[in-house]
Image (tube, grey):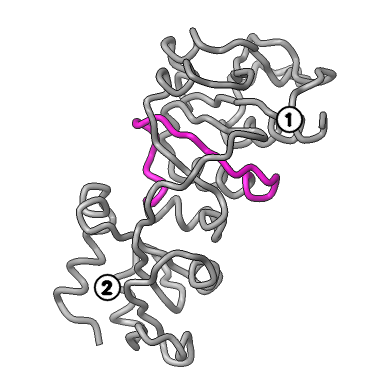
Amino acid sequence: MVSKSQIKLITSLAQKKYRQQHGLFVVEGLKGIEEFLDSSLSLHSLYALPGYFETEKSRIEVDDRELKKISFLKTPQKALAVFHIPEAGEELNQGLTLVLDEVRDPGNLGTIIRYCDWYGIKNVICSNQTVDCYNPKVVQATMGSLTRVTVNYKDLEHYLRSAQHPVYGAFMDGASVYGQTLPQDAILILGNEANGISKEVEALVQHRIAIPRFGTHETESLNVAVAGAILVSEFKRSG
């Protein structure tokens, strides 16, 4: 059974300020919870329907009605877990690092983290204005990949000024990424969904690259997560 204080705590974790205050975040769904349980992250509590995660010591059995009260999903997925937010992970000074400048959509960030896991990218650096990676919608979209990708939040101008690798930025008017020889140790910046890379960050970009349009219609732009996946694929293919 879920107490009123537990419901209050869990539902408060929808907001960043309470996630930071309590140092906790929510994971929903069987696969996602399994991924986090198998990681180094520390479990705070787990709420599950009968027959699920019954060997977990921190498990609290709930029914459908109770699970619906604490779930952030329209259709709750059998279980919900609360984990402790880990300390900032150590960055690797090699390979491709993805930098996100004010990416605001949780689904986009979750998708980006997921394909970083696929392509073996260990470092994602976010501006302080980028959506929180422990937002429930981001966590859900990562499908467990957040356990294997290090996400840190920084002042991007300060970070890029001290960068030791070439800095690439995604722009509509950049040079075509196709056919370029791209370094394996590099920084790739993706910008805000509506406004692209900010002027302050743009000033620190050394190489402007783009995905050429082949269609005849004047499509405004690609979704940032889609564009990032194409560019990351080219960096990996070039190696």
Q: Residue at x 61, y 10 (%)?
A: 206
Q: Residue 176 in the image: x percent, y percent? A: 75, 15
Question: Is 182 or 33 nearer to us in this picture?
Answer: 182
Picture quarter with the N terminus: bottom left
Q: Residue at x 61, y 27 (%)?
A: 222
Q: Name the residue under label 2.
A: 69
Q: Which residue is drawn at 48% across and 86% down?
A: 52
Q: Residue 44 in the image: x percent, y percent? A: 32, 72
* Residue type, numbered disc 1: Gln
Q: Does the magenta stretch include residue 91?
A: no
The residue mark sitting in front, 2 or 1, is: 1
For the view shown, which residue lies furthest in the right direction? 179
Magenta stretch: give its range. 116-135
For residue 106, side relative to residue 164 (left or right): left
Tell me: residue 183, above or below residue 226: above
Q: Residue 205 in the image: x percent, y percent? A: 56, 12
Q: Name the residue under label 1.
A: 184
